[in-house]
Image: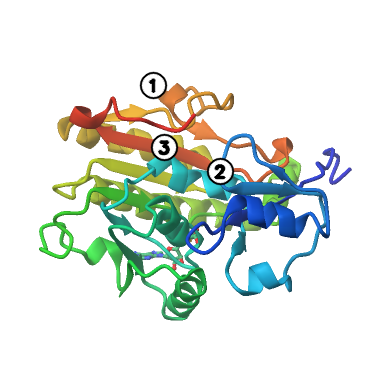
Amino acid sequence: VLNGQPSVVRPRYVRVNTLKYDVSSAIQELEKICKVKKDDVVPDLLVLPAGTDLHDHPLVVNGSVFLQGKASSMPAFALNPEPGWKVLDACAAPGNKTIQLAAIMDGKGEITACELNDKRVLHLKDTIKRSGASNVTVFHGDFLGINPKDPLFSKIQAILLDPSCSGSGTSIERLDHLLPSSEVNDAGKANNDRIWKLASFQKKALAHALSFPAVERVVYSTCSLHQMENEDVVMSALPLATSLNFNLVSPFPKWPHRGLPVFEGSEKLLRTDPAEGMDGFFITLFVKKREAKKKTRQ
Ligand code: SAM
């Protein structure tokens, strides 16, 4: 029990990097040290017992598998870009989702990974190198500064937007939310100001992503639990999305936990819950109408 809340035992997850290795070999190798099963929702994701430490395992060191949580593995599969597509990962470092996109696309097509922060861009380059992905170009700059009509970007078909957020759905940051309201003090106010600033960036970034002329799919994801960073951001983009012919499409339609019911259609949004043994994530998928019938993940 943690701060009056029952703590949930979390399994460990590893994603097999199918650019370098195959799922059955990974299972065979990892079964030498622990019990392994395939995740029932996310392809290429393996579930290991809680507490399994794989940091120094050769498969991790050589980039055959990546330590990546279940919720964090869902946004790239929600976007599900096709091999050969031109894809932009708008806020990319440390690059877990960038290289997952490369694997989903079988290494075919072009991925641009955009990252603003000088130090994090180095981490991004290192992740890409370890993954063996050869179709990723790093763009070190501000996503909001990209001109969607620039010939380098005007043919982008899919955008993953996983911007900076409060991280309130992740295990460490989440503890803030367990404080009784009587203890919400100056720190609480500073936190609210921070969330407000993050949300205003997230709204600009989502509107910007929707404005790329050839984009057919946009995924907006956060690891936040706050409505301000999630449903409210999506709601602010709806008039623009509608005018550009985008629909909200349900990513992982069988997933039971959906967006907060704050606008019509919010049941298309997906939430994951820390009480379900994973980080709290929020995922929204926009699809241009002419494409809306194409497959989405189960
Ligand atoms: N998608 C990443 C992954 O799965 O590994 C995590 C992305 S993290 C939540 C958000 C990233 O966006 C940070 O590395 C941050 O430096 C970057 N960022 C923030 N503002 C940005 C901007 N205006 N343009 C590009 N990157 C930005």
Q: Find residue 181 and report its horizontal and vertical position in percent.
A: 71, 41
Q: Residue at x 76, y 42 (%)?
A: 180
Q: Find residue 4 and report its horizontal and vertical position in percent.
A: 86, 40
Q: Give above or below for 182 relative to 132.
A: above
| In this rendering, position of residue 149 left or right of residue 204 | left
Which amino acid type corresponds to the residue marked 2 in the rendered image? Phe
| In this rendering, position of residue 144 left or right of residue 31 | left
Q: Which residue is mark 1?
A: 265
Secondary structure at badge 2 equals loop
Asked if residue 145 can be seen in this view, the reply is yes
Secondary structure at badge 1 equals loop
Q: Residue at x 23, y 35 (%)?
A: 241
Q: Which residue is mark 3?
A: 284
Q: Going from the N terminus, do you reach mark 2 or mark 1 first?
A: 1
| Residue 155 falls in image quadrant | bottom left
Secondary structure at badge 3 equals strand
Q: Residue at x 43, y 60 (%)?
A: 98
Q: Give ligand 1's quarter of the image.
A: bottom left
Which amino acid type corresponds to the residue marked 1 in the rendered image? Gly
Q: Residue at x 71, y 35 (%)?
A: 276
Task: Give the distance between the C-alpha atoms of the residues marked 2 and 1, in whole angstroms.
Answer: 18 Å
Task: Give the distance between the C-alpha atoms of the residues marked 3 and 1, in whole angstroms.
Answer: 11 Å
Q: Which mark is residue 281?
A: 2
